[in-house]
Image (cartoon, grey):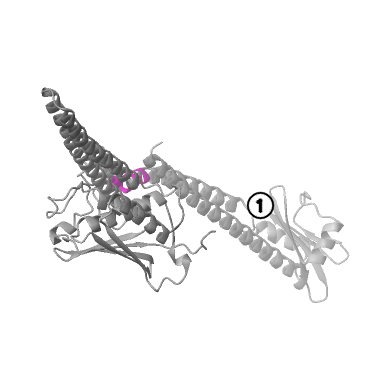
Amino acid sequence: MNIRSKLTLRFISITAVIILLGSVFIYLFSADYRREDFYSRLQNKANNTAKLLIEIEEVNTDLLRRLERDNPISLPDEKIIIYNFRDSLLFTTDEEKTIKVDTMLLDRIRLEDEVRYKQDDYEVLGYLFKGQYDRFVVVAAATDIYGYRKLQNLLLILAIVFAVSIVIISVAGWFYAGKALQPISKVVNRVDEISITSLNLRVDEGNGQDEIAKLAQRFNSMLSRLESAFATQKNFISNASHELRTPLTAVTGQLEVALLNARSAEEYKNVINSVLDDIKNLNRLSNRLLLLAQSSLEEREKRMMLLRIDELLWQVKEELLKHHPAFRINIDLDETIDDETKLMIKGDDQLIKTALSNIIENACKYSNDRTAQVLVSGSRSGLALTFRDNGIGIPKEDLENIFEPFYRGSNTTDIKGHGIGLSMVNNIVKLHMGTIAIESKPGMGTTVTLTFPTHGAAFPG
């Protein structure tokens, strides 16, 4: 069953229940009013009869009986019975003794002052009539033919109104549900038009305020992220294939040239060394591509542990100096770091070391003095790592694209590199809920600031 049918059925059900309850209350109130009105008329009629008999001396039972037979305002099939305090019958119009009256009923009336009950089709009222010198029990009964006919007529009207209302509500509900779901139908139709080749299309957001508009906004936001992800993936594949092709082409070319003619052992050795350098370069590129892919995965459940950032920095420094003895790396702890717990972060040690290594290596590589200054300090948002160099800097027009994979500054064409490092660092920092900021001026060096949330747990061991 589709949503339109469900909404229509629910609308009909809710409205039907409301109308039905309303009809039931109307009928019950009308029935209660009929009963009270009938008993009131019955008591008034019986009260007048009792007054004539008891308070007017000229009226005896025979005269009163004739008056009652000829009374035009008598109730249908009316019966009036009057007893004195000795339970002796003083007056009755119930010649056939249809209404059953016994001593227990009379005692009950005297005890309760008024008793109402039904006997077959009769509605019976017994009450205590107080005369000037004595008390009398009056029992009156009649059938409310006209009242019940009115109730039956009311019930018929309510049933017809209910049936007609359900029909009208069904038609109105169907059109109302269709109108209410029209924006969703537009969204569905628009979504059907969107494919992998048309991710630039967007869903109509309508008035921009109701729930359907919010759904469309969220969907458009998701489409924007998907479009960006597909574009990034496409660029990544294109750039990665280009970067991998260059060293492979160089290796192939050198080997083909070496095979053209017989060469000396020294020449073959030089070719092998050159090919080995290209393969090492290719290996480093492959490793960085794998790390870039790993750092792009938004898997927060990956294995995290408590890490001391100063220990990681010293490890990175030691590894970099092994491969680049000319590098100079100065690590300082700010005086705001007065507790070892302020150096603790939660993260993946391999990824964090990769990020730190890339930033420090770039700082040394692009500086004439091969020097990187590293400052560890506290900040409002956690732990701050500041990396400074006196290198060539980054042009202003390149700063906004510096985190794109394979993007390199316009002033780095003479320096070897692949443009992967900062993109990978950015992904790693985001994965660890941190931030990265870069300030740079050409010829005056670059400052990179990483901020990580700290972990308040004591350092183990």
Q: Position of residue 459 (x, y in %)?
A: 51, 61
Q: Position of residue 255 (x, y in %)?
A: 16, 28
Q: Residue at x 19, y 41 (%)?
A: 239
Q: Residue at x 19, y 36 (%)?
A: 274
Q: Nearer the viewer, residue 411 or 104?
A: 411
**Residue 232 shows in the view:** yes
**Range of the magenta residues?**
172-185
In the displayed structure image, the side of residue 63 where residue 31 appears, left or right: left
Q: Residue at x 33, y 55 (%)?
A: 356
Residue 37 lies in quadrant: bottom right
Residue that mark 1 sits on: 143
Residue 107 lies in quadrant: bottom right
Q: Nearer the viewer, residue 225 or 444?
A: 444
Q: Secondary structure at mark 1?
A: loop
Q: Main secondary structure of the magenta part?
A: helix
Q: Residue at x 22, y 50 (%)?
A: 404
